[in-house]
Image: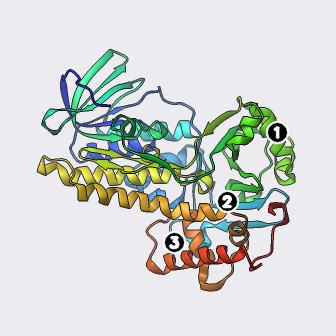
């Protein structure tokens, strides 16, 4: 949508969205001497799902100086992840210390309301101006290679122009929609997540008490993420048609999938919901391009990767840092990004997404999951998978080759039982 907006004040950078991507971009840009304005539609702290971090996102949290605050916040330490089947035929545990480099042995399971608030306050303290309860209402290319926008905030409607725009609006994809960037799904089957926070969910013991637990069943999967104060984030991910056939009854669909799978039923036998169930649909999509002239898309505003491996927060932070560095490298020219720079930014962020998408496709396929749950020791493939489970995306050529071999083994499993079959998935 292109429209003419009245111009008033001018900004170096406007960031839409105050989640991890927006806060990280704001902090980096402000520390480099720019004057970013961050517009967040809600008032923090606010609830959001997606509580599990990955160790290879720790570096950014330490660079920003928030790591000590996270250590004091009471968040549960996460040392790895568990994968199992709903009928308990298979169980596979990944410990970060066994697969990752030294210094990446753990990260945190976080209450996102508190975690995102820490990052947003850090952006403010770094010099980023933040306006909460600010809803962007219009966005357009302006004269002189600028961008115009208006937003409704606490002081009414404000119009301004900016040299750069960072879209960190999450799945709203505000810039992508306004600028008509083509969007397409990265998985054919549409999925929906039904989730809530619960008290009384059975947990592992010892260091594994903080593990994310992923339970795979024939039609989808479930997550259990332990949080502080005895809370657990629990969700099921199923085909959207299943919920549609149940006429949108979240509770009946959720309860049915929990009670139908012994592993889930046992863990949830004493669970009590702390808030109503919620649903999020339209999984796995991306815009064709993540950069255009003076606009860069970050995190979920660029594309949404299925959250099986909890990559969302880390991808948001890494793409935000890259967007900030891209802007800083270009600002002295006083021009926007050329087509090559746009392609380079898109290729790097899309490459990170593609690494996860490849293994996620294997996870959803019966044969692929059988190999995943019984990874053959040849070529050190289990460690390569462990790198992705821990969030390392700058994989050397040898590790990428091993993942390619993993994909070949998954394809062969469709015809030959290289790994033991999982009867409940057949």
Image point (66%, 73%), residue name? 410
Q: Secondary structure at mark 2?
A: helix
Label annotation for residue 364: 2
Give the farthest residue toward the top. Answer: 156
The image shows residue 16 at horizontal and vertical percentages of 37, 35
Image point (28%, 20%), residue name? 158
Tell me which corner region of the image, top left, top right, bottom left or bottom right, holds residue 167: top left
Mark 1 closeness class: few <14, some 14–19, many ≥20 residues within 10 Å: few
Badge nearest the viewer, 3 or 2: 2
Badge nearest the viewer, 1 or 3: 1
Asked if the residues shown at circle 1 and circle 3 are in contact, with their CB atoms under 8 angstroms apart, the answer is: no
In this rendering, the answer to whether 381 lies above or below 303 is below
The image shows residue 352 at horizontal and vertical percentages of 45, 61
| Residue 58 visible in the current orientation | yes
Earlier in the chain: of badge 1 and badge 2, it is: 1
In three-dimensional space, the C-alpha distance between marks 1 and 3, rounded to whole angstroms, equals 41 Å
Label annotation for residue 102: 3
Label annotation for residue 255: 1
In three-dimensional space, the C-alpha distance between marks 1 and 2, rounded to whole angstroms, equals 22 Å
Give the farthest residue toward the bottom. Answer: 378
Image point (61%, 39%), residue name? 281
Q: How many marks?
A: 3
């Amino acid at each position: 949508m292109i429209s003419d907006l009245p111009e008033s004040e001018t900004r170096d950078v406007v960031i839409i969205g105050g989640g991890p991507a927006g806060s990280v971009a704001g902090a980096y840009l402000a520390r480099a001497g720019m004057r970013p304005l961050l517009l967040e539609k809600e008032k923090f702290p606010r609830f959001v799902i997606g509580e599990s971090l990955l160790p290879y996102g720790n570096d950014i949290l330490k660079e920003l100086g928030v790591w000590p605050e996270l250590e004091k916040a009471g968040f549960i330490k996460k040392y790895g992840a568990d994968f199992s089947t709903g009928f308990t035929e298979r169980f596979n545990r990944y410990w970060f210390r066994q697969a990752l480099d030294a210094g990446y042995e753990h990260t945190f399971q976080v209450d996102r309301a508190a975690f995102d608030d820490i990052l947003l306050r850090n952006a403010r303290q770094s010099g980023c101006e933040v306006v909460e309860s600010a809803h962007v209402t219009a966005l357009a290319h302006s004269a002189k290679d600028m961008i115009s926008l208006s937003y409704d905030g606490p002081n009414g409607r404000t119009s301004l122009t900016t040299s750069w725009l960072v879209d960190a609006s999450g799945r709203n994809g505000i810039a992508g929609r306004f600028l008509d960037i083509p969007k397409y799904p990265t998985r054919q089957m549409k999925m929906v997540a039904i989730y809530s926070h619960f008290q009384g969910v059975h947990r592992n013991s010892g260091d594994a008490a903080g593990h994310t637990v992923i339970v795979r069943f024939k039609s989808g999967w479930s997550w259990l993420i332990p949080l502080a104060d005895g809370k657990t984030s629990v969700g099921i991910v199923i085909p959207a048609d299943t919920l549609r056939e149940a006429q949108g009854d979240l509770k009946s669909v959720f309860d049915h999938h929990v009670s139908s799978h012994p592993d889930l039923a046992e863990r949830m036998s004493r669970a009590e919901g702390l808030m109503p169930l919620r649903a999020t649909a339209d999984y796995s999509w991306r815009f064709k391009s993540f950069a255009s002239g003076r606009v860069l898309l970050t995190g979920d505003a660029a594309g949404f990767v299925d959250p099986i491996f909890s990559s969302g927060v880390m991808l948001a932070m890494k793409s935000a840092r890259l967007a900030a560095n891209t802007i800083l490298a270009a600002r002295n020219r006083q021009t926007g990004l050329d087509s090559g720079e746009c392609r380079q930014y898109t290729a790097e962020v899309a490459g990170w997404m593609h690494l996860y998408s490849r293994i996620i496709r294997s996870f959803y396929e019966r044969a692929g999951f059988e190999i995943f749950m019984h990874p053959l020791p040849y070529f050190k493939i289990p460690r390569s998978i462990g790198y992705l489970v821990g969030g390392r995306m700058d994989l050397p050529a040898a590790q990428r080759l091993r993942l390619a071999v993993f994909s070949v083994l998954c394809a062969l499993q469709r015809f030959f039982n290289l790994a033991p079959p999982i009867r409940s998935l057949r």
